[in-house]
Image (cartoon, rainbow, N blue to C red):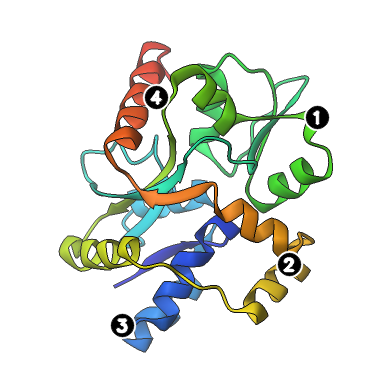
């Protein structure tokens, strides 16, 4: 079994959960070799190179995939999916964020992930937080990614269900390592993770449905 890993801070609690779980070591080790950014994981899942991954919500609408009600969900603001006003430039790392910008009518340079978080924290007045912009317009959470599966659905569903029920403690040495590598303080990492939830509940599902409907209307 193979699982694709998004190596962003927003998935840090999930990776700590996996690391501390009683899952086979061979499975845990395989995750490190399937690490990539969201758009590449979309492709890997589509071509069946991996069995499961949190992929862009727009890419999860695929008849060959089964989805699980776990994802990367911004309750309101998110800080790590941003637009810098100006000429429109796609971020090749995320399909969903580029389409979200279009559905919101926002033109500018789209940036996602840890680099986006760093940029936003350094100069928030220059950027539009797309999680906040979506919530202001729709009053619903935004689902940036959804757990999608090619094979072993029950196995991955059990993992996701257990993860959502647990409160994950991030050890200081891991926080320190991420802070050093991303040039983002430990306090900012902790604060940022409060914006994220991993459960696609009724409101999050309603937000996802509304986004997908808007994307279809715009033929995106």
Judging by the rendered image, the residue that carries numbered circle 3 is 23
Rendering coords of residue 199 (x, y %):
34, 50
**CB within 8 Å, label 1 to label 4:** no
- Between label 2 and label 3, give the one nearer the viewer: 2
- Between label 1 and label 4, give the one nearer the viewer: 1
Judged from the image, the secondary structure of the residue bearing numbered disc 3 is: loop
Give the vertical position of 166 relative to 80 (above or below).
below
Give the left or right position of residue 95, taking residue 164 as reference.
Answer: right
Judged from the image, the secondary structure of the residue bearing numbered disc 2 is: helix
Picture residue at 75% right of the left edge, 41% below the top: 120
Whether residue 86 can be seen here: yes
**CB within 8 Å, label 4 to label 2:** no
Judging by the rendered image, the residue that carries numbered circle 1 is 125
Rendering coords of residue 47 (x, y %):
34, 52
Rendering coords of residue 188 (x, y %):
71, 56
Sequence order check, earlier mark of 2 and 1: 1
Looking at the rendering, in which quadrant would you find the C terminus?
top left
**How far apart in space, not on screen, are marks 2 and 1 (Cα)?**
23 Å
Picture residue at 76% right of the left edge, 49% below the top: 118
Sequence order check, earlier mark of 1 and 3: 3
Give the left or right position of residue 138, taking residue 202 as reference.
Answer: right
Give the left or right position of residue 183, taking residue 177 as reference.
Answer: right
**How far apart in space, not on screen, are marks 4 and 2 (Cα)?**
33 Å
Q: Residues within 10 Å of mark 1 (few under 14, many from 20)?
A: few
**CB within 8 Å, label 2 to label 3:** no
**How far apart in space, not on screen, are marks 1 and 3 (Cα)?**
44 Å
Which numbered disc covers residue 179? 2
Judging by the rendered image, the residue that carries numbered circle 4 is 211
Give the vertical position of 196 relative to 27 (above or below).
above
């Amino acid at each position: 079994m193979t699982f694709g890993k998004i190596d962003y801070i927003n998935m840090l609690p999930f990776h700590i959960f996996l690391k501390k779980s009683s899952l086979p070591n061979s499975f845990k080790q395989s995750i490190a070799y399937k690490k990539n950014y969201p758009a590449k994981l979309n492709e890997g899942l589509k071509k069946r190179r991996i069995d499961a991954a949190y992929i862009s919500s727009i890419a999860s609408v695929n008849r060959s995939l089964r989805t699980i009600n776990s994802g990367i969900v911004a309750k309101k603001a998110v800080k790590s999916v941003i637009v810098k006003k100006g000429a429109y430039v796609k971020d090749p790392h995320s399909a969903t964020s580029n389409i979200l910008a279009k559905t919101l009518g926002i033109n500018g340079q789209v940036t996602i992930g840890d680099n986006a978080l760093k940029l936003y924290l350094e100069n928030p007045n220059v950027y539009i937080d797309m999680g906040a912009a979506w919530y202001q317009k729709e009053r619903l959470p935004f689902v940036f990614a959804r757990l999608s599966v090619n094979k072993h659905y029950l196995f991955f569903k059990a993992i996701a269900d257990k993860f959502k029920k647990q409160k994950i403690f991030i050890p200081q040495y891991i926080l320190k390592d991420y802070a050093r590598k991303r040039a983002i303080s430990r306090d900012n990492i902790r604060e940022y993770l409060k914006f994220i939830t991993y459960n696609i509940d009724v409101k999050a599902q309603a937000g996802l449905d509304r986004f997908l409907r808007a994307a279809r209307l715009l033929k995106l």
